[in-house]
Amino acid sequence: MRKATGALAAVIAAASMLVSCANLGEKELESWAPSAEKKTKTATVTTVPEIEPEETVTTKKTKKTTAETEPPVTEIPTETSKKKETFTISRISIPKITLRTRPADESSEAQPANGTVSEPDQHTGTEQTRTITWRTIDGRYDLSVTVTYFREDYNYFASLPRDNDPYHCQKYIDDEYNRKFLSQIANAIRDVCSKQGYDEIETVKEAVRFVQSVPYKQDVESKGELEYFKYPIETIAENNGDCEDLSMLLAGILREMGYGTCFFLFPTHIAVGVKGSDSVPGMYYVQDGVRYYFIETTDFGWNIGDFPDELYKDKDSIIYIPITN
């Protein structure tokens, strides 16, 4: 994906001072104490990087109408963790959603998505940009990241056949090109957050808000199809996506930041989980003694650990899909 010269080289230079987390293992979120030093000036910071399958309709979780507060730590009961017999959460009023059918069976004969591009660093062509701007979680700043890519690369991935099996979501973020694409976005988010003095968990929260700022659009609207999984470059280039597209984008960014991540599959939805310590507030799922905190991507304002009210009925049928490095 990267060129030795050109717009992408600017990202490489800008990110050269950042420590790569991709090979440091799976980190986990930890709670933090806000700095006593108050940020008083509003600023805009722009970093320019180079940068189930039967008839189904994906759904959007609407924005919270209540003030953003961190819910108490609540564990989703599972077969491996039954420490709590009850399930409580601050209720959030959500409109009725359109249901989608369950994911295809693992034996589905659909061909896995294969986006491997030979020698991605040698790509050249027509440069395109997409700027994502969002208001920080503390409400003090507007941050922007401008992603640069080649139109020809977008056309290549857009031309690939689709494997719309939710069990195969990781395939869309695993090829060499899209991993580099996601890594550049991750580094750019780290860069703008570093300039504001944000710590690690604040930076992760801003990565969530970056993805939430990409407009939600169902596949029937954007592609004229009931289901159409997108590669990250497609989601950014087209500036829209539905639940699985935005979940794949966020999961890929968090993985490139070094965090343990997973997908949560519901009968009606796909979301992201991020590995966290017991000091992090909010909803989480326990797998093999590890907590994965729920993240909703389909609208702006959901915090890490916030759990949509309409998914409550499906809390015991969550399917956990780990994302490997």
Image: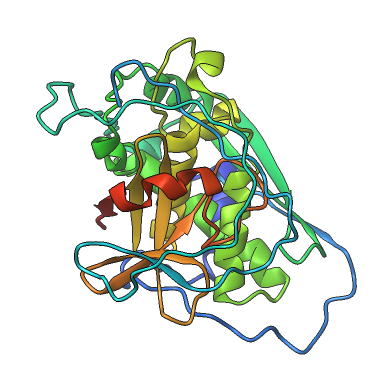
| Position of residue 210 measured from the top left corner of the image (x, y, whole percent) | 62, 50
Residue 30 higher or lower than 176, as above or below: below
Whole-percent x and y of residue 37? 79, 87
Question: In this rendering, would 41 be left or right of 285?
Answer: right
Picture quarter with the C terminus: bottom left
**Residue 324 locus on image (x, y percent):** 24, 56
Name the residue at the right extreme: 41
- Viewer-closest of 297 and 265: 265
Residue displayed at 51% across by 56% down? 186
Can residue 280 be seen here? Answer: yes
| In the image, farthest residue toward the top | 224
State whether residue 101 is above or below residue 83: above
Q: Position of residue 118 (x, y in %)?
A: 27, 33
User: Which residue occupies the extreme left position in the image?
Assistant: 107
- Report the number of numbered marks: 0
Residue 49: in sight, yes or no? no
**Residue farthest toward the bottom in the current orientation of the protein:** 36
Q: Residue at x 22, y 28 (%)?
A: 104
In the figure, 275 relative to 102: above or below?
below
Q: Is residue 221 left or right of residue 67?
A: left
Q: Nearer the viewer, residue 61 or 199?
A: 61
Task: Residue at 54%, 17% (x, y): give it.
Answer: 222
Would residue 257 appear left or right of 32 to someone viewing this image? left
- The residue at 35%/42% (across/down) is 173
**Looking at the rendering, which quadrant does residue 230 occupy?**
top left
Image quarter of the N terminus: top left
Report the coloring of the rendering. rainbow
Q: Nearer the viewer, residue 186 or 140?
A: 140
